[in-house]
Amino acid sequence: MGNLVTMDDLSNDDIIAVLDDAERLVPVARGEILLPLLQGKVLANMFFENSTRTRMSFETAMKRLGGSVLNFSSVGTSVSKGETLYDTMQMIDGYADVAAIRHPRQGAAQYSADAVRIPILNAGDGAGNHPTQTMLDLFTIRQAHESLDGLNVVLVGDLRYGRTAHSLSHALVRFGASLTLVSPTSLKMPVEIVSDLRSHGADVTETESLNEQITGADVIYMTRIQKERFPDEEEYTKVAGIYKIEATDLVGAKEGMIVMHPLPRVDEIAPSVDSTKFARYFQQAFNGVPTRMSLLCRSLGVKVPKKVK
Amino acid sequence: MTEMRRVTAIRNGTVIDHIPSGYAMQVIRILGIDTDRATPVSLVMNVPSDKIGRKDVLKIEDRELDQEDLDRLALIAPAASIAIIRNHAVAEKMKVELGDDLLNIARCSFSNCITKNNHEPLPQRMRVISRDPLEVRCYYCGCGQEIDELIENII
């Protein structure tokens, strides 16, 4: 109950409901309204891998709703002494009401969900899934386009190891999106994911070139080529810096088009884009707070009031 | 002489018929039959079959397959028919059936799966996504498993 391991755990109606709740929680996320819906509840932030935005926005989300947070990092703890994930999670099961978990190994979130009674929110498992990021991405897209239906979305960069792109593409095709997957051959979206996307009847195009995709896009979703996921340095150097967007590249773009990025960026998006009307990545990072507030409430079975004041 | 008589009938044991042609050795492997031991195993390969074109047949003496064996067998020989032989007569007939969930049958082949840590206590678990063509994925990490990898990683 209440787990969010992959986007399959949410129906389309669930997604819309979570986004609606998140929208009403925006003033609470900004600290303008006090709403202690989760007072007395404890979130365990189980980060077995580094994170800035995800960890901090989970923490802010919990605290803004009056809850408290246990922060765990695997460095210098029982994990470095060889403790299994199973045992670590058993401990947390007794300490917290809900856990957000990030782990370098794929499948760790599902494994944790099977190991404990408290709800598990997957905050990224290896190159697997990152559904809370997807929810904030969908929130950002809906904010700009008013609806999630039938958009033309261009996903760019590391589509092989990029878990953000995996979860997001799964969700978008359920709302009838057309997807253009732009990546070097060595970083193409895994075949089983592309086959899943097509089995939903989605229009999926794979290409190596970004330039001609800009004018037709409603959303350009840039991702970082993740150095840490490459087996060797040489493979990384071959593809590092392959896609870059400058403000001048966006001249022919659609009026309402938005450029997104899960951040951190390296050089995929030049600072010149930041001041254009297309840039949406910092807004996107903020949106992690109301979205995760909404997801925490859902996991804990707490209803967000229809009127937040 | 019928196709089944290409090798001598067995007194006690199991006959596995309708194995896809060329897969008898994999079946031996997947069932963990110790070929170094004295147990006689008769193997017939590439004989004509009305049901599946060409087939392999295995006769294993002094061993009766159980349900867990059948679950493994279903991965590579979904059309196999099994006869348990006692005292030269067919005592029981069984069919294989591939379930939706494979518990502790094979290890995930993906090097970065959480289950790669041998100390983790939860069972190895695979989901069968489709039967024809066979598509199996790790329940935890979601990675697709090739049939050869599954055989390689049988527990």
Image (cartoon, coloured by chain):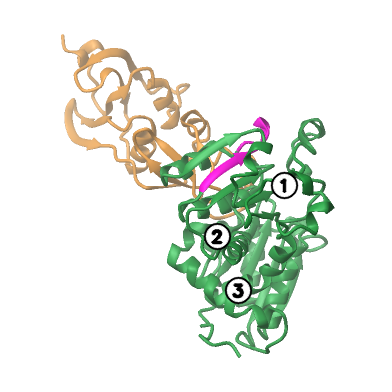
Chain colours: A green, B orange
Mark 3 and mark 2: span between their CA atoms? 13 Å
- Mark 3 crowd level (few <14, some 14–19, many ≥20, 10 Å Cα): many
Residue A253, horizontal then vertical, whole percent = 66, 48
**Label 2 to label 1: alpha-carbon separation:** 39 Å
Closest to the observer, B9 or A65: A65
* Amino acid on which disc 1 is placed: Val
Q: Which residue is mark 1?
A: A251
Q: Quadrant of residue A36?
A: bottom right
User: For mark 3, what is the residue?
Assistant: A98
> What residue is shown with label 2?
A5
Q: Is residue B119 visible?
A: no
* Left or right of A47, for residue B15: left
SS for dot 2 = loop
Q: Earlier in the sequence, mark 3 or mark 2?
A: 2
Q: Is residue B22 left or right of residue A179?
A: left
Magenta stretch holds residue A179: yes
Dot 3 amino acid type: Val
Q: Hey, what amino acid is under mark 2? A: Val
Left or right of B116, for residue B95: left
Q: Secondary structure at mark 3?
A: strand
Q: Nearer the viewer, mark 1 or mark 3?
A: 1
Residue B19's quadrant in the figure? top left
Seen in the picture, residue A96 relative to B89 is either above or below; the reply is below
Q: Which residue range is magenta in the image?
A: A178-188
Quadrant in which the C terminus of chain A is drawn: bottom right
